[in-house]
Image (cartoon, rainbow, N blue to C red):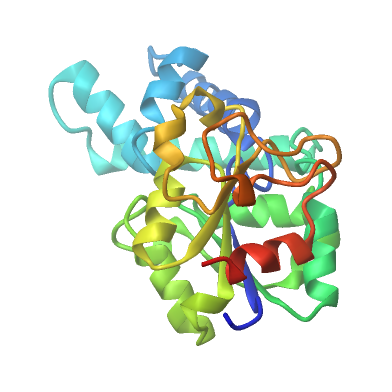
């Protein structure tokens, strides 16, 4: 029999909160305006750019593609700093609530003594903003954060998850990852971790085949969301009610 569930690793963007379209996108556009840049991203453009992990790299890719050469690092510094400031203001204004069921599951895991960590490609400033905002009531539940600045290679590379395992001295067989995207799933899978995908506004655009390595795919963690309409083994389909620790334990124990 598999060992009991010992830890939950949480992605941030799209998993803890729907941050991409409601937070990061408007913050990028406010940064462009503040810095006098002639660019604005619409949701369709941003959806394409999200294939590039990390905001700084996203900006670098966009500017290089638009202008034919890599932007100066000083220019990127200014844009990133402005974007982080606008994003922080949005989060602290209460514009980005946690997704349904997230606070409950974090609390239940903490009460059960599970180790919890955030593993994200986002900056430490972005995590700090959410921790001071919507995540404030449960932020103490997290033993560590692995942020974009902590790794050389961001998701879908597994470096962040491997760093979290090393830092917390955890057995991968006893860890379950909560992700919302194919890239995050790929990172968790490459690190040898069991992963549940909780579909976000972003990842609902991805084909079911993108989640073939997930142990389960669900619409969300809260009441009435249940299993996602993708091809998954019947044993991996989520309960009709909220996602529970006991169900996650069953996934860890599944062959």
Viewer can see residue 117: no
Residue extending furthest toward the bottom: 169
Residue at image coords 34%, 61%:
190
Residue 248 showing in the rendered view: yes
Asked if residue 233 lies left or right of residue 96, the reply is: left
Could you tell me which residue is drawn at 46 percent across and 31 percent down?
A: 208
Percent x, y for residue 67?
A: 19, 18
In this view, 52 is above or below 201: below
Q: Nearer the viewer, residue 135 or 236?
A: 236
User: In the image, what residue occupies the spot 53% across and 83% down?
Assistant: 168
In-image side of 78 versus 122 (left or right): left
Q: Closer to the camera, 53 or 186?
A: 186
* Quarter assignment of residue 250: bottom right
Task: Return the x and y of residue 142 as percentages of the image width and height.
Answer: 69, 70
Instruction: Point out the residue furthest to the left here.
Output: 68
Residue 88 place in picture, x, y as percent: 66, 43
Quadrant that contains the N terminus: bottom right
């Amino acid at each position: 029999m598999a060992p009991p569930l010992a830890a939950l690793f949480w992605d941030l963007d799209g998993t803890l909160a729907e941050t991409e379209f409601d937070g990061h996108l408007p913050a990028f556009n406010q940064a462009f305006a503040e810095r006098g840049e002639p660019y604005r991203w619409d949701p369709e453009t941003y959806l394409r750019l999200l294939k590039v992990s990390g905001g700084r790299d996203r900006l670098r890719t966009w500017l290089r593609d638009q202008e034919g050469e890599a932007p100066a690092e000083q220019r990127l510094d200014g844009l990133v700093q402005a974007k982080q400031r606008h994003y922080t203001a949005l989060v602290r204004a209460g514009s980005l609530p946690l997704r349904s069921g997230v606070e409950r599951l974090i609390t239940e895991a903490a009460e059960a003594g599970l180790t919890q960590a955030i593993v994200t490609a986002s900056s430490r400033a972005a995590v700090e903003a959410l921790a001071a905002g919507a995540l404030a009531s449960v932020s103490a539940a997290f033993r560590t954060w692995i942020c974009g600045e902590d790794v050389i290679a961001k998701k879908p590379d597994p470096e962040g998850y491997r760093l979290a395992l090393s830092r917390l001295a955890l057995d991968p067989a006893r860890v379950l990852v909560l992700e919302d995207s194919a890239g995050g799933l790929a990172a968790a899978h490459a690190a040898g971790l069991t992963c549940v995908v909780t579909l976000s506004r972003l990842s609902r655009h991805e084909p079911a085949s993108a989640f073939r390595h997930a142990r389960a795919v669900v619409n969300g963690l809260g009441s009435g969301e249940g299993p996602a309409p993708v091809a998954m083994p019947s044993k991996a389909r989520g309960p009709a009610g909220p996602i529970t620790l006991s169900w996650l334990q069953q996934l860890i124990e599944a062959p």
